[in-house]
Image: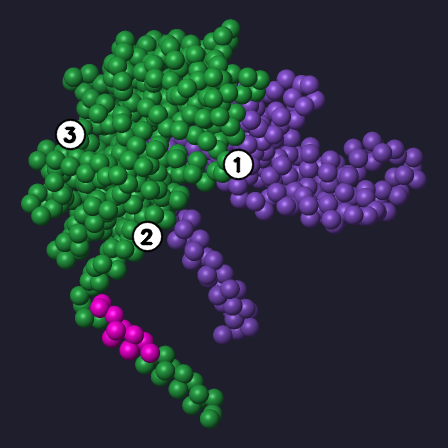
Chain colours: A purple, B green
């Protein structure tokens, strides 16, 4: 065996444990789900499982609850992605400008992300409670009217987004800070010698050079946004009036409460197609600039 | 001693001890039957159940029961997949409302032989409780308890408002709710809307399905129940804080709400609080007749067990049923009349007060589509309380959705 072959083999051997679990727990379920999407498969009557062609997809198109949950998912994604990018960028710029204490704040930003979604959800449910929660207690103390954070449709989704920001902002901010620190200082110094002010430095140097990282943050948060489950499940359980029940929660309910695995699998593939389409468009829109 | 010799001695010691230990255990003689027992008792009730399991194991050296608790939210998924794959527990607990679905999936074996001479007497159960586990000629489980929904009251708030005790009818209820309203304190708050609806619905004569088993939500009893609940949230004369699911119980725990309607299973939560004076009472008669919602934990044996396993499983189920007074201590109402008649049970004030409703409790309807029913009904109730839809429109929409799901599963529903 040549050196190159041995090198190749050792590479595959290192990969093998992960590859095996990836095939068993990711690829195989995906393939099975694709098959299930064309079957009527109800766990309560597994013996009556049969092929139904595209019937599950037709039902999904006609199911008013699918459209409701898709609307909730889009609403969450449309709110979380821009607010995440803007907040993370602002925090990263602030940290980058700091001479001292940066590491402490960076570590603190990560603390909420270390909490499990169930703990975070229970905590924020109490914060948001209409009559007996912390936020409305504080609002009342300063003479302001209480806000129905989770009990009114108009406030519920923004409230979930706020909790998600608190929970996940640290990661995105640190990624952006790392990218900022990669920009060579002489570039800024040269521009300043040429008379560039702060705004021009940001628009002509910082922002363009951050585009690859911004693309990463936008795409990963878009995917996470479409997959949102834990936050609304814990805070509102999809309410009020299903206004915050996303597609993943609906799929979960279909598959694991109603035991309609075939229909649930079909909806999962619809979600995959939607995420793929959005990711593709985002890449197309931002890749040119990023290159 | 060299390293190799030392290692050999250690291995020999380990093997030797293992051999001796295995020789000590009854399993080595092939006599001990291993049973796995699954349930969703993750709260303080789980500790009590674990103590019962230990007592059984001590009293029955030929059987070893190991208990596994998991959250009810994921319990049924795991149970169903495990049983269908032939790896499920030999004994498990189901909520009565899930029996039709689990029975359809073939999870349980009949336990009819638990009853009769030398076993449990069917006469020890109230007919409506026993009817939950009877499917044709088979009895598919043994009811362990009954969890009626009742009224929890804050004693200090009642006294402060000059009230002598929990309200008993609609007039007293509304009066008490108004009397306890003070600043950020409320006399009454809605807990889970659907649960409150289903607790009051029997009082108004409401029903879910017609005689043919088709969805029939738009009926006068349901409409009257909804109109009453809607009246509580009248913006011009508000008797409840703005509706928010889960708010009611949190407010009651914080002693800012005087009364809530909830299940006996919430008692465990209150038992952990200090300096909180509360009482339990039957749900006031808001409608025409007394009535409330209830459910039960049912002890079931898996289908496909060997003779030894089945015999041990039935013995374990009988043990739990016969010792359910200990279970009552965890904040439950035993299903057996003889246990409820004991002095020990009468000394459990909330359990005893809630148990007074047993003659007129109503279980969830018998349908495999219980999840779909509860979800669509819950949404309709929420829309009415929030005044987004009229009771007629909300129920009509829910009715159509529920009928669709019945048509899909090709099933009819019981009353």
Q: Nearer the viewer, residue B15 or B348?
A: B348
Up/down of A114 relative to B334, above or below: below
* Extreme-bottom residue of the structure: B1
Q: How many C-alpha atoms fall within 10 Å of the one at disc 2: few (<14), some, or many (≥20)?
A: some
Q: Position of residue B82 (x, y in %)?
A: 28, 48
Q: How many C-alpha atoms fall within 10 Å of the one at disc 3: few (<14), some, or many (≥20)?
A: few
Prevailing secondary structure of the magenta residues: helix
Label 3: which secondary element: helix
Q: Residue at coordinates 49% horizontally, 38% vertically from top-left? A: B274
Residue B264 magenta-highlighted: no
* Marks 2 and 3 share the same chain: yes
Q: Report whether A95 appears left or right of B154.
A: right
Q: Nearer the viewer, mark 1 or mark 2?
A: 2
Q: Residue at coordinates 29% horizontally, 74% vertically from top-left? A: B21
User: CA–CA distance between discs 3 and 1?
Assistant: 42 Å
Q: Nearer the viewer, residue A190 or A153?
A: A153
Q: Report whether B217 appears left or right of A138.
A: left
Q: Which residues are magenta?
A: B17-27
Q: Which residue is mark 3?
A: B127
Q: Is residue B89 visible?
A: yes
Q: Position of residue A17 (x, y in %)?
A: 46, 61
Q: Position of residue A217 (x, y in %)?
A: 63, 39
Q: Which residue is mark 1?
A: A121
């Amino acid at each position: 065996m040549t050196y190159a072959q041995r090198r190749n083999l050792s590479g595959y051997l290192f990969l093998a444990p992960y590859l095996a679990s990836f095939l068993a727990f990711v690829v195989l379920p995906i393939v099975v789900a694709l098959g299930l999407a064309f079957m009527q498969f109800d766990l309560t009557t597994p013996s009556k499982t049969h092929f139904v062609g595209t019937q599950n997809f037709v039902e999904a198109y006609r199911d008013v609850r699918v459209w409701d949950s898709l609307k909730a998912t889009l609403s969450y994604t449309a709110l979380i992605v821009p607010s995440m990018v803007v907040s993370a960028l602002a925090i990263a710029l602030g940290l980058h400008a700091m001479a001292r204490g940066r590491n402490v704040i960076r570590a603190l930003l990560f603390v909420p992300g270390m909490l499990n979604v169930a703990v975070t959800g229970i905590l924020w449910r109490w914060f948001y409670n209409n009559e007996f929660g912390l936020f409305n207690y504080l609002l009342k103390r300063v003479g302001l009217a209480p806000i129905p954070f989770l009990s009114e449709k108009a406030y519920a989704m923004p409230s979930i987004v706020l909790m998600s920001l608190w929970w996940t902002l640290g990661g995105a901010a640190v990624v952006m800070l790392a990218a900022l620190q990669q920009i060579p200082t002489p570039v800024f110094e040269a521009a300043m010698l040429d008379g560039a002010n702060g705004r021009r430095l940001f628009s002509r140097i910082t922002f363009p050079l951050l585009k690859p990282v911004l693309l990463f943050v936008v795409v990963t948060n878009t995917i996470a946004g479409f997959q949102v489950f834990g936050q609304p499940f814990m805070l509102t359980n999809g309410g009020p009036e299903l206004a915050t029940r996303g597609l993943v929660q609906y799929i979960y309910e279909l598959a694991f409460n109603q035991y309609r695995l075939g229909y649930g699998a079909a909806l999962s593939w619809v979600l995959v197609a939607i995420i793929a389409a959005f990711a593709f468009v985002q890449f197309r829109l931002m890749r040119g600039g990023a290159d | 001693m060299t390293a190799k010799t030392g290692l050999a001695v250690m291995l020999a010691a380990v093997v030797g001890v293992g051999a001796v230990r295995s020789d000590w255990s009854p399993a080595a003689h092939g006599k001990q039957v291993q049973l796995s027992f699954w349930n969703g008792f993750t709260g303080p009730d789980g500790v009590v159940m674990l103590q019962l399991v230990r007592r059984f194991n001590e009293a029955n050296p030929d059987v070893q029961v190991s208990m596994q608790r998991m959250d009810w939210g994921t319990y049924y998924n795991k149970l169903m997949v495990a049983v269908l794959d032939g790896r499920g527990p030999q004994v498990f607990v189901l909520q009565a409302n899930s029996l039709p679905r689990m029975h359809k999936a073939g999870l349980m074996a009949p336990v009819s032989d638990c009853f009769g001479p030398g076993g449990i007497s069917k006469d020890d159960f109230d007919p409506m409780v026993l009817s939950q586990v009877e499917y044709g000629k088979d009895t598919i489980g043994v009811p362990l308890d009954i969890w009626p929904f009742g009224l929890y009251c804050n004693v200090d708030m009642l006294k402060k408002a000059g009230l002598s005790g929990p309200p008993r009818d609609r007039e007293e209820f509304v009066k008490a709710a108004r009397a306890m309203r003070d600043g950020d304190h409320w006399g009454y708050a809605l807990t889970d809307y659907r649960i409150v609806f289903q607790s009051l619905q029997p009082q108004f004569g409401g029903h879910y399905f017609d005689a043919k088993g088709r969805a029939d939500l738009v009926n006068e009893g349901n409409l009257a129940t909804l109109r009453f609940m809607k009246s509580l949230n009248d913006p011009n004369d508000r008797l409840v804080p703005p509706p928010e699911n889960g708010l009611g119980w949190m407010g009651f725990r914080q002693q800012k709400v005087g009364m809530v309607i909830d299940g006996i299973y919430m008692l465990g939560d209150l038992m952990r609080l200090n300096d909180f004076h509360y009482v339990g009472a039957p749900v006031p008669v808001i409608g025409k007749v007394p009535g409330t919602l209830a459910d039960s934990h049912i002890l079931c044996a898996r289908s496909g067990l060997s003779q030894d396993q089945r015999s041990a499983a039935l013995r374990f189920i009988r043990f739990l049923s016969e010792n359910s007074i200990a279970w009552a201590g965890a904040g439950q109402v035993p299903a057996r009349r003889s246990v409820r008649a004991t002095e020990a049970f009468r000394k459990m004030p909330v359990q005893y007060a809630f148990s007074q409703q047993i003659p007129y409790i109503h279980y969830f309807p018998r349908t495999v589509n219980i999840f779909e029913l509860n979800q669509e009904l819950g949404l309709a109730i929420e829309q009415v309380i929030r005044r987004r839809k009229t009771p007629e429109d909300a129920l009509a929409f829910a009715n159509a959705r529920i009928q669709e799901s019945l048509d899909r599963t090709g099933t009819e529903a019981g009353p």
